[in-house]
Image: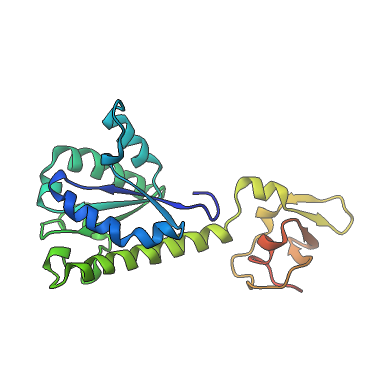
Amino acid sequence: MAMMDTVDVFLAYARADELLRNALEKHLSMLMRQGLITSWHNQQILPGQEWEPETILHLSTADIILLLLSPDFLASDYSYGVELKHAMERHQRGEATVIPVILRPVDWKHHSLGKLRALPSDERPVTSWPNQDEGFLSVAEGIREVVKKMRETAVLSLTNKEAKDLQTIGQDGSSIRPIQQALKPNDQQGASPGKYHIQIDEGKGTVIGDRAQVTQTFSEK
């Protein structure tokens, strides 16, 4: 996910839970309208497309993978053996965030995904809520929090290209380094725009470049 881009959400579900998936998407519609997320599931595969390569493509590039858990999901060889396995591998590599969404009561805690925090709140299955809309609302609110955190992290992170654009210049003008080498995780945020003087090893330097990004990282001295 590039800085401030829309977050791509993949929905993995069993065909028997299609109505519940539809209901969840309705509750995610505000996030979509606000341009915060896009969602994809295999019912969006067009006629003439091969369903498995298309599914793996989206599963391999999603920022968030929602595993819509139910007895049918865990009983499905494809959902369990392919989608779940691939999702957990990407999660463990830090490439995507996997969120279990408990649609119906099911024994899921004895899998490695049982270590993950699930939605809705209190990990109560959506169908066990007196009002299912409230259960789906809890899911949507949880996803909004994750998306907000991902976007905030993206804003504060420099991509490789941005690191090349922002450079530190020594007092004598002879020392030029990528700004990544000068970043300090505990620097105060929220400084006003302008030039920022920072300590680099034993010498001082001046940060120049994209001021909007610099103000997210450095405090004015």
Give whichever of 24, 64 is nearer the camera: 24
Q: Position of residue 37 (x, y in %)?
A: 42, 54
Residue placed farthest to the right in the image?
172
Residue at point 41%, 47% (across, down) = 95
Which quarter of the figure is the C terminus placed in? bottom right
- Say left or right for 204 vs 219: right
Q: Residue at x 15, y 50 (%)?
A: 17
Residue 67 left/right relative to 4: left
Which color mode does the image show? rainbow
Q: Work out whether 203 lies above or below 96.
A: below
Give the residue drawn at x 60%, y 70%.
186
Give residue 61's quadrant in the image. top left
Left or right of 59 in this view: 216: right
Q: Position of residue 114 (x, y in %)?
A: 21, 58
Task: Where is residue 31? Give x, y as percent.
Answer: 40, 60
Q: Is residue 152 above or below residue 59?
A: below
Q: Residue sitting at 83 percent across and 56 percent down?
A: 170
The tally of labels here is: 0
Position of residue 134 measured from the top left corner of the image (x, y, whole percent): 22, 71
Instruction: Tell me the quarter of the picture where residue 187 sits.
Output: bottom right
Task: Tell me where residue 118 sits by quadrant.
Answer: bottom left
